[in-house]
Amino acid sequence: MINKLTFITILSFTFLFLIGCTKNDNIPLKTQLSQLPTTKPVDNKINRPTEVRPLPGKLNNIPMINSNSPEWLRDEGILLSTFSSTEKAFPHAHLGYPLSGKFELFDHHYIINQPESKTIYLGFLVHNPNKKAISLNISEAASNLIIAVPNSKSKNPLDGSRASDAILKGVRDSYFPSQITLQPNEYKLIMNKSIDTLGLPRNLNGRSSHIRFESKEIGSNTPALINFASLAMYGKKDSNGKIQPPTLTQWRQLLEKGDLAKPRDKTPTPPQKTEGNLIYSRVAGIQQGTKWQTDLTNSGKNYLKIPQDGKSLSFVISTIRKSTLGTNQIQSANLLTRYPDTAYEAHGNYGVHYDLTAPLFNPYSQPKTVTVAIETSLKSENNQVLSFDSKSDSSAVFSGLVRLRYLDDASLPTESYITVKQSRGQVVKPLLTLNLKPQETRKVRVDFLYPPDSTPPQVLTFTTNPN
């Protein structure tokens, strides 16, 4: 039995509690009660002891045109131009950085709330500034809408990595020629494609493009200078009211008279600032490096010793400032030139080809089972532990195609492509399981183009199963 004093005391605290809940008279008491904090859920965090290593090697020196800012288009304008600023209406819109020889293009932009009466086009314009004719070779090329329009044949309705995935497979879309010739001072369009939004929620869509180029003087292997511009323009209606792609003349007029496309992205945090909020912003410039190819081995050895039973070893992928998983390695490509209000580095290395070979060595006297996985752990700066969430249900932060090449347990050469889609902290299944004999060494090659719209970092993990 509760005595009278105790009952009065409980009633008094209850009354004061309810008065506190009704402090905002505009919110019904029932609603406020429903918003009270609930019991803290059981922690789903899994800490796995793992040796986390920096990735050996470095990016190559091949330049890449990286056009990802502004990420969201709202109007026409210049996205990126390597042309000279001379005789241009808006000199600040041109980087004055012609390229030559081998180079790549990564171009990735969205548009939202596009008027139904309009369709925006993306145009890739090239120009020969030399006194001799040149050739521009295209070895791989792809350009895709990021969201498949209604009634399309696409099996994946949302995928920003399709263009980069195609490059991994060595594809050159039939839309793109294998070679074009440019006479002195000649301009040509490499691409003139729309971002279709009709029938999509909020009239939202995007286009992602990836192309590998090589420019040469005609009749020789001498690299030749070439100018490039990525431009955005609304199609023009013809006499019948049908929207038509902009013409070469119209694209040239935009190049000469146009300003940078808007709205601009957030201004990035300078690299020297290490405290407070860090704004990476989006990239618009020429980065140094298109491929990170390396062997994963122990120091001074030509093999990678597999971990002990039940242990894991990871190598970091696409680490950025303030997010290195305890390795202090920043893999972001340097920018040779950039627009002043855009990212200082190629954060995320979108479109960079990671090509990693691990000669796995079993030094033990018993057979061992080893798994290979790409993982997206929770962020931390501890290089001895990776953390995961057993009930992770957040949106995907890594989504792209991964290629595996190896000898299977029957010593047969095997190649497979696997689509990897992960949320932050998700516990994932391995991509590959191998059974290594005592003293056996077997190479596993894992490669992929770092997928656009993904959020770094990730790790490549090797685990030896417990006996």
Image: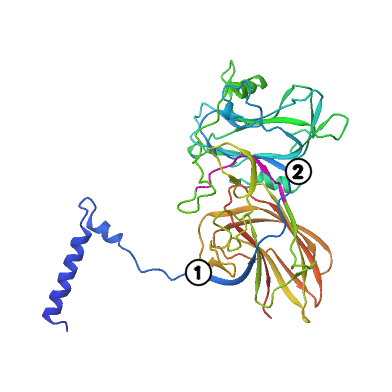
Give the residue at the far top of this rendering.
Answer: 239
Cα distance in 3D space between marks 1 and 2: 41 Å
On screen, residue 148 above or below 467: above
Residue 79's x, y, as percent?
59, 33
Residue 25's x, y, as percent?
20, 52
Label 2 sits on a secondary structure element that is loop
- When asked about the image quadrant of residue 172, the answer is top right
Marks 1 and 2: which is nearer the front?
Answer: 1
What's the residue type where badge 2 is placed? Val
Q: How many marks?
A: 2
Q: Is residue 401 at least partly visible in the picture?
A: yes
The residue labelled by disc 1 is: 45
Say which quadrant the C terminus sits in. Answer: bottom right
N-terminal-most mark, 1 or 2: 1
Residue 260 inside the magenta-drawn segment: no
What's the residue type where badge 1 is placed? Lys
Say which quadrant the N terminus sits in. Answer: bottom left
Residue 211's x, y, as percent?
71, 39
What residue is at 15 percent from the left and 71 percent from the top?
A: 11
What residue is at 59 percent from the left and 67 percent from the top?
A: 383
Residue 289 inside the magenta-drawn segment: yes
On screen, residue 47 above or below 413: below
Label 1 sits on a secondary structure element that is strand
Query: Around disc 1, counting alpha carbons within 10 Å, would you say few (fewer than 14), some (14 to 19), or many (20 or more)?
Result: some
Residue 359's x, y, as percent?
78, 66
Give the residue at the far bottom of this rendering.
Answer: 1
Give the residue at the far left of this rendering.
Answer: 4
The residue labelled by disc 2 is: 171
Residue extent of the magenta highlight? 279-291
Q: Is residue 149 at least partly visible in the picture?
A: no
